[in-house]
Amino acid sequence: MQRIIGIVIIIALFWAGHWYWRFDANIAALQNWLGNDAEYDETITQRGFPNRYDTELTKFAVPAIGLKTDMIQIMRVVYKQDHRIIALPKDIKIFDTVLKTEQLRASIVADGTHLPRITIEAISPQFSNGLRADRAQLSFIATSQDSTFSLFIEFNNLGSDKIANPQTQRATLHLKPERALDWS
């Protein structure tokens, strides 16, 4: 029994050391992943021990798409560096439009292929122009190595003050850009 306890303690110490050793490397990888397109406060909060890195950036903005929010959380499990979950606050501004939601999350998987797999889901999205839905999903999925991808969009009970009968709307677009997209 003492050997088992000793082995468990050694493994726990090894895991804790690994998490703390990768702490700074995770922040550096995240800053590299965001590149020069994103703006945020110097203060980066990270927690999630023992199995995750939950990183929070405040005063986050991506000017190229007009995204502005008070904070953003980027989470990933320790053993899957290519999969990130992004959580945004209930109110964000994008393309000069205010979006209010009960929950807004994105999943980004960059599995080594040229195009990542991205899914964005919003619960009860309401846009400042009056458009609203019970749920919205946008998925961006690579379909081949030649930069072809599918864009899937779904709004459950899409409506507004001007629409009497909200309905579920779905669209799938298959796109091939004229030049390859660089997602690195």
Image: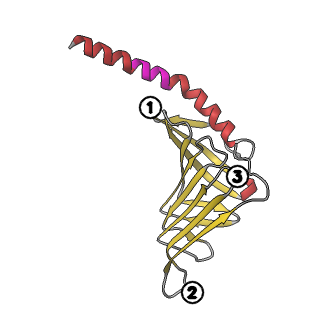
Mark 1, secondary structure of its residue: loop
Dividing the picture into quarters, in which one does residue 161 lie?
bottom right
Q: Please, what is the dominant secondary structure of the magenta stretch?
A: helix
In the picture, the disc for residue 49 is 1
Q: Is residue 42 visible?
A: no
Of residue 75 and residue 181, the one placed in the foreground of this image is 181
Q: Which residue lies furthest to the right in this view?
A: 179
The span shown in magenta is 13-19
Q: Residue tagged by mark 2?
A: 162
Q: Mark 3 points at which residue?
A: 146
| Label 3 crowd (10 A; few <14 / some 14-19 / many >=20) | some
CA separation in Å, label 2 and label 3:
42 Å
Label ID, residue 136 = none
Q: What residue type is labelled 1?
A: Phe
* Residue 148 % position (x, y): 68, 57
Give the CA separation, mark 1 to mark 2: 48 Å
Q: In this view, does 18 lie above or below 107?
A: above
Q: Who comes first in sequence, dot 1 or dot 2?
A: 1
Residue 147: x, y in percent? 70, 53
Q: Tell me the kind of residue under disc 3.
A: Asp
Question: Is 69 a magenta residue?
Answer: no
